[in-house]
Amino acid sequence: MPAPEVSAEALATRLSALGLTTRVLNHTRHTSIEAEVPETLTAKTWQEVLEVLAHADRFGLLATSLGGRTLWAAVNKAVPATGDVRGPGHQR
């Protein structure tokens, strides 16, 4: 399995190839990809976009009342193999 950052960049590249302008944002626990969705996106391209998004850990579409649509996807970062991964509040 590729590193999360590589997976996120691959998703962004594939979405760009479908004509979407993407942004990759690095967060503490995940890397996200965002893209504005043009109103002229064809049904065939939507299907291809969904096939790409199926490789993300989660994804969604944010639509505003003004007609703007932003597609987002997130790729989780790997959990450390050593150390305390239980998180705060679960210490012994």
Image (cartoon, helix red, strand yellow):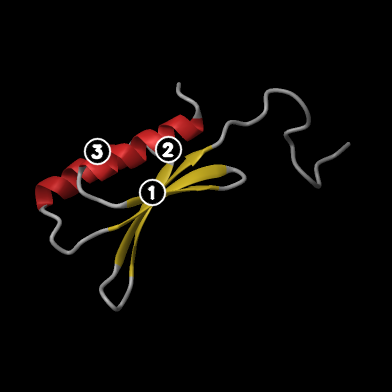
Q: Is residue 1 left or right of residue 90?
A: left
Total numbered badges shown on the rendered structure:
3
Q: Amino acid at mark 3?
A: Glu
Quadrant assignment, res 30: top right
Rendered image: mark on residue 81: none
Q: What is the crowding at mark 2: few (fewer than 14 residues within 10 Å), some, or many (at least 20)?
A: many
The structure residue drawn at horizontal position 40% and vertical position 36%, both measured from the top left corner, is 9
In the rendered view, tell whether residue 91 sits above or below residue 20.
Answer: above
Rendered image: mark on residue 8: 2
The structure residue drawn at horizontal position 77% and vertical position 27%, both measured from the top left corner, is 83
In the rendered view, tell whether residue 7 sits above or below residue 65.
Answer: above
Identify which residue, 78 or 33, lies in the foreground: 33
Task: Give the position of the N terminus as an image quadrant.
Answer: top left
Rendered image: mark on residue 51: 3
* Callout 3: SS: helix
Q: Farthest residue in the right direction?
A: 92
Q: Which residue is mark 1?
A: 59
* Callout 1: SS: strand
In the rendered view, tell whether residue 41 sits above or below residue 68.
Answer: above
Q: What is the crowding at mark 3: few (fewer than 14 residues within 10 Å), some, or many (at least 20)?
A: few
Q: Nearer the viewer, mark 2 or mark 1?
A: 2
Per the model, the C-alpha gap separating discs 1 and 3 is 12 Å
- Quick check: marks 2 and 1 in contact, CB under 8 Å? no
The structure residue drawn at horizontal position 10% and vertical position 46%, both measured from the top left corner, is 44
- Choose the circle earlier in sequence order: 1 or 3: 3
